[in-house]
Image (tube, grey):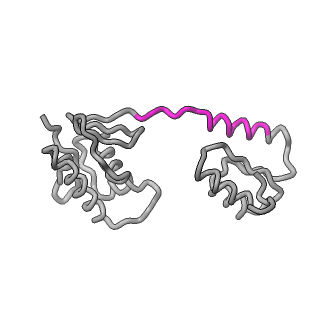
Amino acid sequence: LDIIMPELSGTEVCKELRARSSVPIVFLTSVDDEVDRILGLEMGGDDYVTKPFSPRELVARVKAVLRRSQRVAEPEPELTHGRLRLAPGSFRAFMGESVIELTATEFRILQALLTQPGRVFSRDDLMDRAWADGCVVADRTIDSHIKRIRKKFEPHGWNPVETVHGMGYRLAEAPA
C-alpha cells in the first residue's frame, strides 16, 4: 500500500483490510515521516518501506512477511481439571458435556488458574493475564469476574475458584 492514494489514504485502507482479513500488508511509499511509519505499523501494516528502496531488499522484506504470515500457529492444548475442560482454540469451556458460556475475560481468568493448579494468584496476577493489553482496571474488578464465574458453575454443583483470604485465588479441587 502507498500512504498517498486517491480517495482513501493507505492507512485507512490498511485499517479496513485488518478489520476483515489477516492478509500481509507492506507499505511502499515516499512518505518517510516517523509519525506516518509508526501510524502505518500501528494500523496493522506488517512492514513499511520508503522510496527510494533497493529492489532486492524489498523482495527480501516481502518474503519475510510472507514467511511469518504462512506459519501455522500451534493450537493451544485443551486444559482439563476433573470434568472441567477449556478449549483455548475455540474459547469454549465445558463441564462434562455441557457448554459453559464465559466472557473472554472470564475465560482467560479460568485459563490462568488451570495452567498452574494449586498456585495462588493475586488479583494483580490475574489482571495481567486477563487484560494483557495493558488496560488499567480496578483490582476489585477481578472479584466481580470471579463472582460471575462461580455463578455460571453453580448449576453444575461446583465452584471452580477458591478464595485464599489475604492472598488471592486458586483453582479448587476437581469435582469427583
Q: Nearer the viewer, residue 140 or 96?
A: 96
In the rendered image, residue 37, in percent from the top left (x then y), is placed at 71, 58
- Give the magenta part as a residue range: 59-76
Left/right placement of residue 75 relative to residue 3 reads left
In the rendered image, residue 29, in percent from the top left (x then y), is placed at 80, 54
In the rendered image, residue 119, in percent from the top left (x then y), is placed at 25, 45
Does residue 105 sit above or below 66 in this rendering?
A: below
Is there any visible trace of residue 98 in the rendered image?
Answer: yes
Quadrant for the C terminus in the image: top left
The image quadrant of residue 90 is top left
Left/right placement of residue 97 relative to residue 39 reads left
Q: Nearer the viewer, residue 111 or 134?
A: 111
- Residue at image position (20%, 52%) is 150
The image quadrant of residue 4 is bottom right
In the rendered image, residue 71, in percent from the top left (x then y), is placed at 58, 33
The image quadrant of residue 58 is top right
Is there any visible trace of residue 116 in the rendered image?
Answer: no
Q: Nearer the viewer, residue 121 or 37?
A: 37
Task: Please identify the residue farthest to the bottom as the structure is shown.
Answer: 138
Residue 11 part of the magenta-drawn span: no
Residue 67 part of the magenta-drawn span: yes
Left/right placement of residue 76 relative to residue 12 reads left
Does residue 137 sit above or below 2 in this rendering?
A: below
Q: Nearer the viewer, residue 147 or 64?
A: 147
- Residue at image position (38%, 40%) is 88
- Residue at image position (69%, 56%) is 13
Q: How many marks?
A: 0
Per the picture, the main secondary structure of the magenta-coloured stretch is helix
Left/right placement of residue 165 relative to residue 93 reads left
